[in-house]
Image (cartoon, grey):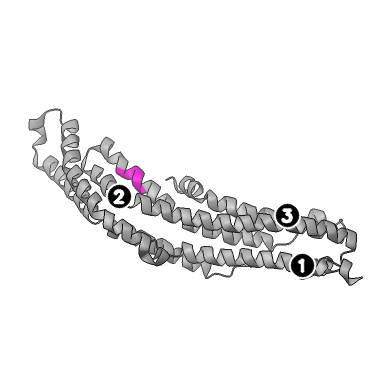
Protein backbone atom coordinates (compact mmCIF):
# COMPACT_ATOMS: atom_id res chain seq x y z
CA UNK A 1 0.00 0.00 0.00
CA UNK A 2 1.16 3.56 -0.75
CA UNK A 3 0.65 4.60 2.86
CA UNK A 4 3.44 2.25 3.89
CA UNK A 5 5.90 3.67 1.33
CA UNK A 6 7.89 6.36 3.11
CA UNK A 7 10.60 6.76 0.49
CA UNK A 8 9.14 9.93 -1.04
CA UNK A 9 8.72 11.56 2.36
CA UNK A 10 12.27 10.64 3.38
CA UNK A 11 13.66 12.01 0.13
CA UNK A 12 11.64 15.23 0.51
CA UNK A 13 12.98 15.68 4.05
CA UNK A 14 16.59 15.15 2.99
CA UNK A 15 16.28 17.47 0.01
CA UNK A 16 14.74 20.15 2.22
CA UNK A 17 17.54 19.90 4.76
CA UNK A 18 20.29 19.91 2.13
CA UNK A 19 18.58 22.89 0.50
CA UNK A 20 18.75 24.65 3.86
CA UNK A 21 22.45 23.83 4.11
CA UNK A 22 23.11 25.16 0.60
CA UNK A 23 21.28 28.38 1.46
CA UNK A 24 23.40 28.74 4.60
CA UNK A 25 26.57 28.24 2.59
CA UNK A 26 25.50 30.94 0.11
CA UNK A 27 24.79 33.26 3.04
CA UNK A 28 28.18 32.47 4.57
CA UNK A 29 29.99 33.36 1.33
CA UNK A 30 28.01 36.58 1.14
CA UNK A 31 29.04 37.48 4.70
CA UNK A 32 32.68 36.44 4.30
CA UNK A 33 33.03 38.64 1.23
CA UNK A 34 31.50 41.56 3.10
CA UNK A 35 33.62 44.17 4.82
CA UNK A 36 32.92 44.80 8.51
CA UNK A 37 32.30 48.41 7.45
CA UNK A 38 29.08 47.40 5.64
CA UNK A 39 28.06 44.53 7.94
CA UNK A 40 24.43 44.83 9.14
CA UNK A 41 24.01 48.07 7.21
CA UNK A 42 27.06 49.68 8.84
CA UNK A 43 25.39 50.07 12.23
CA UNK A 44 27.99 48.15 14.30
CA UNK A 45 30.84 49.83 12.43
CA UNK A 46 29.38 53.26 13.22
CA UNK A 47 29.83 52.43 16.91
CA UNK A 48 33.48 51.54 16.26
CA UNK A 49 34.05 54.82 14.40
CA UNK A 50 32.46 56.82 17.22
CA UNK A 51 34.80 55.21 19.75
CA UNK A 52 37.89 55.49 17.55
CA UNK A 53 38.78 59.14 18.39
CA UNK A 54 39.00 58.21 22.06
CA UNK A 55 41.51 55.42 21.37
CA UNK A 56 43.45 57.60 18.93
CA UNK A 57 43.78 60.26 21.61
CA UNK A 58 45.04 57.73 24.14
CA UNK A 59 47.39 56.20 21.57
CA UNK A 60 48.84 59.61 20.62
CA UNK A 61 49.66 60.26 24.26
CA UNK A 62 51.21 56.82 24.65
CA UNK A 63 53.44 57.37 21.61
CA UNK A 64 55.46 59.96 23.55
CA UNK A 65 55.50 57.82 26.69
CA UNK A 66 56.72 54.72 24.85
CA UNK A 67 59.29 56.79 22.96
CA UNK A 68 60.76 58.03 26.26
CA UNK A 69 60.70 54.51 27.73
CA UNK A 70 62.45 53.12 24.66
CA UNK A 71 65.01 55.90 24.65
CA UNK A 72 65.86 55.39 28.31
CA UNK A 73 66.01 51.61 27.96
CA UNK A 74 68.38 51.74 24.99
CA UNK A 75 70.63 54.46 26.37
CA UNK A 76 73.64 53.36 28.33
CA UNK A 77 75.34 56.71 27.99
CA UNK A 78 72.93 59.51 27.07
CA UNK A 79 75.68 61.68 25.61
CA UNK A 80 76.66 58.95 23.16
CA UNK A 81 73.07 58.72 21.91
CA UNK A 82 73.04 62.32 20.70
CA UNK A 83 74.56 61.36 17.40
CA UNK A 84 72.78 62.55 14.28
CA UNK A 85 72.02 59.10 12.87
CA UNK A 86 70.80 57.80 16.23
CA UNK A 87 68.50 60.77 16.81
CA UNK A 88 67.26 60.59 13.22
CA UNK A 89 66.42 56.90 13.63
CA UNK A 90 64.46 57.55 16.81
CA UNK A 91 62.58 60.49 15.31
CA UNK A 92 61.65 58.43 12.24
CA UNK A 93 60.36 55.69 14.52
CA UNK A 94 58.38 58.26 16.47
CA UNK A 95 56.90 59.73 13.28
CA UNK A 96 55.92 56.34 11.88
CA UNK A 97 54.24 55.36 15.15
CA UNK A 98 52.25 58.59 15.28
CA UNK A 99 51.21 58.22 11.63
CA UNK A 100 50.03 54.65 12.23
CA UNK A 101 48.05 55.72 15.29
CA UNK A 102 46.35 58.56 13.41
CA UNK A 103 45.58 56.51 10.29
CA UNK A 104 45.05 53.06 11.78
CA UNK A 105 41.41 52.84 10.68
CA UNK A 106 42.24 53.57 7.04
CA UNK A 107 45.02 50.96 7.08
CA UNK A 108 42.81 48.25 8.59
CA UNK A 109 39.95 48.99 6.20
CA UNK A 110 42.33 48.39 3.29
CA UNK A 111 42.89 44.85 4.59
CA UNK A 112 39.11 44.33 4.84
CA UNK A 113 38.66 45.29 1.19
CA UNK A 114 41.52 43.08 -0.03
CA UNK A 115 40.38 39.98 1.88
CA UNK A 116 36.75 40.56 0.89
CA UNK A 117 37.72 40.72 -2.79
CA UNK A 118 39.71 37.50 -2.44
CA UNK A 119 36.78 35.67 -0.81
CA UNK A 120 34.37 36.97 -3.45
CA UNK A 121 36.67 35.69 -6.18
CA UNK A 122 36.85 32.28 -4.50
CA UNK A 123 33.05 32.22 -4.15
CA UNK A 124 32.61 32.97 -7.86
CA UNK A 125 34.39 29.75 -8.78
CA UNK A 126 32.33 26.68 -9.61
CA UNK A 127 31.17 25.15 -6.34
CA UNK A 128 29.25 21.90 -6.12
CA UNK A 129 25.99 22.01 -4.15
CA UNK A 130 25.20 19.35 -1.58
CA UNK A 131 22.46 17.13 -3.00
CA UNK A 132 21.16 13.56 -3.12
CA UNK A 133 22.43 11.73 -6.19
CA UNK A 134 19.96 10.33 -8.71
CA UNK A 135 20.95 6.72 -7.96
CA UNK A 136 20.63 7.18 -4.22
CA UNK A 137 17.30 8.98 -4.63
CA UNK A 138 15.91 6.05 -6.63
CA UNK A 139 16.96 3.59 -3.92
CA UNK A 140 15.28 5.70 -1.23
CA UNK A 141 12.05 5.96 -3.22
CA UNK A 142 11.85 2.17 -3.61
CA UNK A 143 12.57 1.25 0.02
CA UNK A 144 10.41 -1.37 1.69
CA UNK A 145 8.29 -0.51 4.72
CA UNK A 146 10.64 -1.95 7.38
CA UNK A 147 13.75 -0.47 5.81
CA UNK A 148 12.06 2.87 5.24
CA UNK A 149 11.23 3.10 8.95
CA UNK A 150 14.91 2.74 9.77
CA UNK A 151 15.76 5.33 7.14
CA UNK A 152 13.10 7.70 8.43
CA UNK A 153 14.48 7.62 11.98
CA UNK A 154 18.03 8.03 10.71
CA UNK A 155 17.01 10.84 8.35
CA UNK A 156 15.36 12.77 11.18
CA UNK A 157 18.50 12.44 13.31
CA UNK A 158 20.81 13.44 10.46
CA UNK A 159 18.52 16.33 9.52
CA UNK A 160 18.68 17.70 13.05
CA UNK A 161 22.48 17.50 12.97
CA UNK A 162 22.60 19.33 9.64
CA UNK A 163 20.22 22.02 10.91
CA UNK A 164 22.40 22.57 14.00
CA UNK A 165 25.51 22.72 11.79
CA UNK A 166 23.81 25.27 9.53
CA UNK A 167 23.07 27.60 12.42
CA UNK A 168 26.49 27.04 14.00
CA UNK A 169 28.38 27.99 10.84
CA UNK A 170 26.46 31.28 10.72
CA UNK A 171 27.33 31.82 14.40
CA UNK A 172 31.02 31.28 13.56
CA UNK A 173 30.91 33.92 10.83
CA UNK A 174 29.07 36.39 13.06
CA UNK A 175 31.60 35.79 15.84
CA UNK A 176 34.39 36.64 13.40
CA UNK A 177 32.80 40.04 12.75
CA UNK A 178 32.51 40.58 16.50
CA UNK A 179 36.19 39.78 17.04
CA UNK A 180 37.22 42.19 14.30
CA UNK A 181 35.13 45.06 15.66
CA UNK A 182 36.36 44.51 19.19
CA UNK A 183 40.06 44.56 18.29
CA UNK A 184 39.94 47.38 15.70
CA UNK A 185 39.74 50.23 18.29
CA UNK A 186 42.72 48.71 20.11
CA UNK A 187 44.90 49.24 17.02
CA UNK A 188 45.72 52.82 18.02
CA UNK A 189 47.14 51.67 21.35
CA UNK A 190 48.99 48.73 19.80
CA UNK A 191 50.58 50.91 17.09
CA UNK A 192 51.71 53.45 19.69
CA UNK A 193 54.12 50.86 21.12
CA UNK A 194 56.09 51.06 17.88
CA UNK A 195 57.67 54.25 19.24
CA UNK A 196 59.43 52.27 21.97
CA UNK A 197 62.32 49.87 21.83
CA UNK A 198 62.15 46.31 20.52
CA UNK A 199 60.68 44.91 23.71
CA UNK A 200 57.88 47.47 23.79
CA UNK A 201 57.17 47.39 20.04
CA UNK A 202 56.69 43.61 20.18
CA UNK A 203 53.13 44.40 21.29
CA UNK A 204 52.44 46.01 17.91
CA UNK A 205 53.80 42.96 16.09
CA UNK A 206 51.66 40.57 18.15
CA UNK A 207 48.56 42.69 17.57
CA UNK A 208 49.08 42.83 13.82
CA UNK A 209 49.66 39.07 13.63
CA UNK A 210 46.44 38.40 15.53
CA UNK A 211 44.52 40.90 13.41
CA UNK A 212 45.82 39.33 10.21
CA UNK A 213 44.86 35.83 11.39
CA UNK A 214 41.31 36.99 12.20
CA UNK A 215 40.86 38.75 8.87
CA UNK A 216 42.52 36.00 6.81
CA UNK A 217 40.40 33.27 8.40
CA UNK A 218 37.64 34.28 5.96
CA UNK A 219 39.79 32.91 3.13
CA UNK A 220 40.44 29.70 5.06
CA UNK A 221 36.70 29.30 5.72
CA UNK A 222 35.91 29.77 2.04
CA UNK A 223 38.47 27.17 0.99
CA UNK A 224 37.25 24.70 3.63
CA UNK A 225 33.63 25.04 2.48
CA UNK A 226 34.46 24.54 -1.19
CA UNK A 227 36.67 21.52 -0.55
CA UNK A 228 34.21 19.90 1.88
CA UNK A 229 31.36 20.37 -0.61
CA UNK A 230 33.53 18.59 -3.17
CA UNK A 231 33.88 15.74 -0.64
CA UNK A 232 30.10 15.49 -0.41
CA UNK A 233 29.66 15.24 -4.17
CA UNK A 234 32.56 12.86 -4.75
CA UNK A 235 30.37 9.82 -4.07
CA UNK A 236 30.90 6.82 -1.85
CA UNK A 237 34.33 5.34 -1.09
CA UNK A 238 35.30 2.18 -2.96
CA UNK A 239 35.01 -0.14 0.06
CA UNK A 240 31.17 0.10 -0.05
CA UNK A 241 30.96 -1.55 -3.48
CA UNK A 242 29.99 -4.96 -2.10
CA UNK A 243 27.22 -3.69 0.18
CA UNK A 244 23.50 -3.81 -0.55
CA UNK A 245 21.98 -0.75 -2.20
CA UNK A 246 20.14 0.38 0.92
CA UNK A 247 23.33 -0.02 3.00
CA UNK A 248 25.32 2.06 0.51
CA UNK A 249 22.71 4.82 0.69
CA UNK A 250 22.78 4.64 4.47
CA UNK A 251 26.55 5.12 4.46
CA UNK A 252 26.13 7.86 1.86
CA UNK A 253 23.77 9.84 4.10
CA UNK A 254 26.04 9.41 7.11
CA UNK A 255 29.01 10.56 5.07
CA UNK A 256 27.15 13.70 3.96
CA UNK A 257 26.31 14.56 7.55
CA UNK A 258 29.85 13.81 8.71
CA UNK A 259 31.32 16.04 5.99
CA UNK A 260 28.93 18.88 6.87
CA UNK A 261 30.01 18.59 10.51
CA UNK A 262 33.62 18.55 9.28
CA UNK A 263 32.96 21.78 7.38
CA UNK A 264 31.72 23.47 10.53
CA UNK A 265 34.73 22.21 12.48
CA UNK A 266 37.12 23.52 9.82
CA UNK A 267 35.41 26.94 9.86
CA UNK A 268 35.50 27.08 13.65
CA UNK A 269 39.25 26.34 13.67
CA UNK A 270 40.00 28.55 10.65
CA UNK A 271 41.80 31.22 12.68
CA UNK A 272 44.12 28.72 14.34
CA UNK A 273 44.76 26.97 11.01
CA UNK A 274 45.50 30.29 9.30
CA UNK A 275 47.85 31.36 12.06
CA UNK A 276 49.81 28.12 11.95
CA UNK A 277 49.99 28.03 8.16
CA UNK A 278 51.25 31.61 7.88
CA UNK A 279 53.30 31.64 11.07
CA UNK A 280 51.14 34.31 12.68
* Residue placed under numbered mark 3 in the picture: 157
Q: Can residue 132 be seen? A: no
**Rendered location of residue 48, percent (x, y):** 32, 56
Label 2 – label 3 distance at C-alpha = 45 Å
* Cβ atoms at labels 1 and 3 below 8 Å apart: no
Q: Which mark is residue 11?
A: 1
On the image, which quarter does residue 167 sit in?
bottom right
Horizontally, residue 277 falls left or right of residue 196, namely right
Residue 30 position in % (x across, y down): 49, 67
Name the residue at 16% across, 42% down: 64
Q: Position of residue 213 (x, y in %)?
A: 43, 50
Quarter of the figure with the C terminus:
top left
The magenta-colored residue range is: 204-208
Disc on the earlier residue, 1 or 3: 1
| In front of the other: 226 or 45 | 45
Q: In this rendering, would 181 be left or right of 62?
A: right
Most foreground residue, 192 or 148: 148
Residue occupied by mark 2: 187
Nearer to me, 51 or 217: 51
Of callouts 1 and 2, the N-terminal one = 1
Amino acid sequence: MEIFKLGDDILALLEMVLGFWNNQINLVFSLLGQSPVSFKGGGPWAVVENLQPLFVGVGSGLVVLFFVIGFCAESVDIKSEFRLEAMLRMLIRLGIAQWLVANNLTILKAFFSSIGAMVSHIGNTTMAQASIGAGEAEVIENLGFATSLVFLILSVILSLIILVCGFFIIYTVYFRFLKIMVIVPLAAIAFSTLAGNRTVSATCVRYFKYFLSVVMEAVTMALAIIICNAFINAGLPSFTGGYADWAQVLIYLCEITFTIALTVGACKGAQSLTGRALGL
